């Protein structure tokens, strides 16, 4: 599992108290580092300031006085290396009657969090703070609402092994220029000094009595050493860290000389203070280019003397299953190759065997190194289908499995979108289209155009509008109006209509024509003007237009009889 921290700091910038502030809803977006796929996460711990609360993204932050701040923090885990790419939250508070209100949030700023740390200074509280990047500037976001720039001393730092491989750092007072670290060797921890809480201080230390925290931490360090010892003496490894002293918050990152194989027992500063374990930590980073792990040691401190002694102890490794890097599902095609690398490691450095089962016909698995292998499959014609396989790494007693789906597409549709590749290349010049989109924006998806055999790059245009009136009617109204139902059209372009009226059935004698008539809500109406002839036949047609393509014409006719003439009777 890969643990990580997500933190939030809320500051009340108003002039009144905010009652019952809470994060009413929240959502995170976490993607897998190597392949960008969504990754599930587990919340292992939740905190408001440093008080543990129920494990949920929703937090009750409590009452927040004007200009005060409160922090929330979540400890999370993912099954594999991932990145948090989004965090959305809705904040609420209560009004004077206790009713919930959505909080007015003036600004939300997100920053990559390096570490949850703790500022240990007389003028600071004891609540966890956040060490994060504000743009390119490493910044300390304190729990009480202050932002402080942090100086990175990594380039000036020196990390050197002390002469004795046992616990050797003692604190000595210098004459005239303050404290410094003396590289004196101490005897191994024996039964006599195992009970001496002052083992980390020599008689020349300026501190007559170590603080309770120092005593407890020193005792804890010796207990850890005793637990890891395989003999009467607890073997420790001491290094000295040096960089320029500073009154500003300081940070150092240096290469871990033990490459993660040893744990930090304790860190002592030259003024006798034991560095809070929260402010010193180890990390590892996997380089996708070199396929190698890099290991680092980090230290954060305030009002730093610039001189520290690190005491390391051997890691007590418990038997554990191998770790395997995530392998995504793979897609190939007939006549192509599906291959991927398997990269597993054993924390106990045991020999590993790597298998893929069942192996598709023609596939090969070649071992490269311990826990590393390459799967290669030259797919043959006739092997279209889905092939679920189990990739396994085992040390003989414990194993780790991954299920990987190998999908084989046909040779005529190597991208598996259901459209023939030759057809895609002919119309799109690429296989990048997935069949879901609508290239010509005519409302017909590319895949449907493929099935119909139509051209996906040409707008198919609107359908023929249906005539409502007049069709073959006698028109008696003095105001002639031509009405059609709106043409069916699945595209998003605006539709207009064109009407033409003729005096002969062959439509060779035009009488009047419209320009573009804007489409109505459900039908479209046009009232032509002109010198209409009484008791005369008229013939008309209409079509729709989307700016690119006209629909076919639809045809109608009517007889104009606007005046009732007297009947002529002849004897």
Image: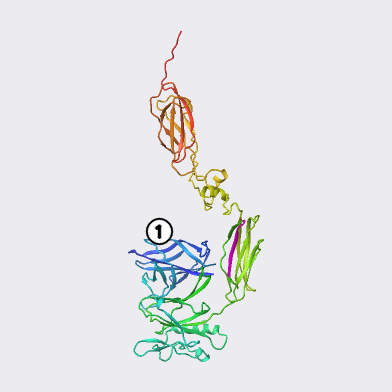
At label 1, counting other C-alpha atoms closer than 10 Å, the crowd grade (few under 14, some 14-19, many 20 or more) is: few
Q: Residue furthest left?
A: 15
The image quadrant where one finds the N terminus is: bottom right
* Residue 102, x across and y down, in percent: 40, 58
Tell me the element at label 1: strand
Visible residue check, residue 57: no
In the image, 125 versus 507, the foreground residue is 507
In the image, 549 versus 218, the foreground residue is 549
* Residue 381, x across and y down, in percent: 64, 55
Residue 335: say if magenta.
yes
What type of secondary structure mainly makes up the magenta span?
strand
Q: Which image quadrant for residue 537?
A: top left
Visible residue check, residue 255: yes
Residue 492: say if magenta.
no
Location of mark 1 (residue): 101
* Residue 500, x across and y down, in percent: 43, 30
* Residue 372, x across and y down, in percent: 59, 70
Left or right, 120 with respect to 348, comes to left
Q: Which residues are magenta?
A: 334-343
Q: At 46% across and 63% down in the image, what residue appears?
A: 85
Q: Is residue 294 above or below residue 429?
A: below
Q: At 66% across and 61% down in the image, what residue appears?
A: 362
Q: Residue furthest top?
A: 571
In the image, 524 versus 278, the foreground residue is 524
């Amino acid at each position: 599992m890969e643990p990580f921290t997500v933190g939030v700091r809320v500051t009340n910038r108003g002039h009144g108290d905010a009652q019952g502030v809470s994060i009413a809803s929240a959502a995170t977006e976490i993607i897998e580092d190597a392949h960008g796929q969504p990754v599930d996460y587990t919340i292992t711990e939740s905190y408001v300031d440093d008080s543990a609360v129920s494990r949920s993204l929703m937090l009750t932050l409590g009452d927040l006085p004007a200009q005060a701040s409160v922090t929330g923090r979540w400890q999370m885990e993912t099954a594999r290396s991932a990145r948090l790419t989004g965090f959305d939250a809705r904040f609420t508070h209560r009004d004077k009657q206790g009713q919930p209100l959505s909080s007015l949030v003036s600004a939300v700023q997100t920053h990559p969090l390096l570490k949850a740390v703790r500022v240990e200074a007389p003028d600071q509280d004891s609540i966890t703070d956040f060490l994060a990047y504000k743009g390119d500037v490493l910044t300390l976001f304190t729990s009480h609402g202050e932002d402080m720039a942090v100086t990175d001393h990594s380039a000036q730092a020196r990390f050197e092994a002390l002469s004795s491989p046992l616990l050797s750092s003692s604190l000595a007072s210098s004459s005239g220029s303050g404290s410094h670290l003396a590289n004196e060797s101490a005897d191994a921890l024996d039964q006599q000094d195992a009970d001496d809480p002052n083992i980390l201080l020599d008689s020349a230390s300026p501190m007559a009595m170590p603080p309770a925290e120092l005593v407890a931490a020193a005792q804890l360090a010796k207990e850890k050493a005793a637990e890891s010892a395989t003999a009467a003496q607890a073997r420790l490894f001491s290094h000295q860290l040096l960089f320029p002293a500073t009154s500003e918050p300081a940070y150092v990152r240096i290469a871990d000389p033990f490459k993660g194989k040893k744990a930090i027992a304790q860190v002592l500063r030259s003024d006798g203070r034991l560095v809070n374990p929260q402010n010193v930590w180890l990390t590892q980073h996997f380089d996708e280019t070199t396929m190698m792990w890099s290991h680092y040691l980090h230290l954060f401190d305030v009002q730093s003397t610039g001189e520290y002694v690190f005491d390391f102890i051997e890691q007590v490794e418990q038997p554990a299953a191998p770790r395997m890097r995530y392998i995504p599902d793979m897609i190939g095609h007939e006549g192509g190759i599906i291959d991927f690398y398997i990269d597993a490691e054993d924390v106990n450095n045991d020999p590993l065997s790597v298998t893929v089962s069942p192996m598709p016909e023609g596939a090969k698995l070649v071992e490269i190194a311990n826990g590393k292998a390459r799967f290669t499959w030259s797919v043959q014609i006739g092997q279209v289908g889905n092939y679920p396989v189990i990739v396994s790494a085992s040390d003989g007693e414990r194993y780790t499995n991954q299920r990987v789906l190998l999908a084989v597409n046909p040779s005529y549709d190597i991208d598996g979108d259901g459209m023939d590749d030759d057809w895609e290349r002919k119309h799109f010049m690429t296989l990048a289209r997935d069949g879901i989109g609508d290239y010509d924006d005519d409302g017909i998806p590319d895949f449907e155009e493929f099935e119909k055999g139509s051209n996906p790059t040409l707008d198919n245009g609107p359908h023929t509008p249906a005539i409502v009136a007049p069709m073959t009617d006698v028109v008696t109204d003095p105001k002639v109006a031509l009405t059609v139902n709106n043409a069916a059209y699945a595209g998003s372009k605006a539709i207009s209509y064109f009407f033409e009226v003729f005096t002969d059935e062959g439509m060779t004698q035009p009488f009047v024509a419209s320009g573009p008539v804007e489409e109505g809500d459900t039908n479209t109406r046009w009232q032509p003007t002109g010198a209409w002839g009484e008791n005369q036949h008229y013939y008309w047609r209409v079509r729709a237009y989307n700016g690119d393509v006209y629909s076919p014409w639809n045809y109608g006719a009517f007889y104009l009889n606007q005046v009732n003439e007297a009947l002529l009777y002849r004897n």
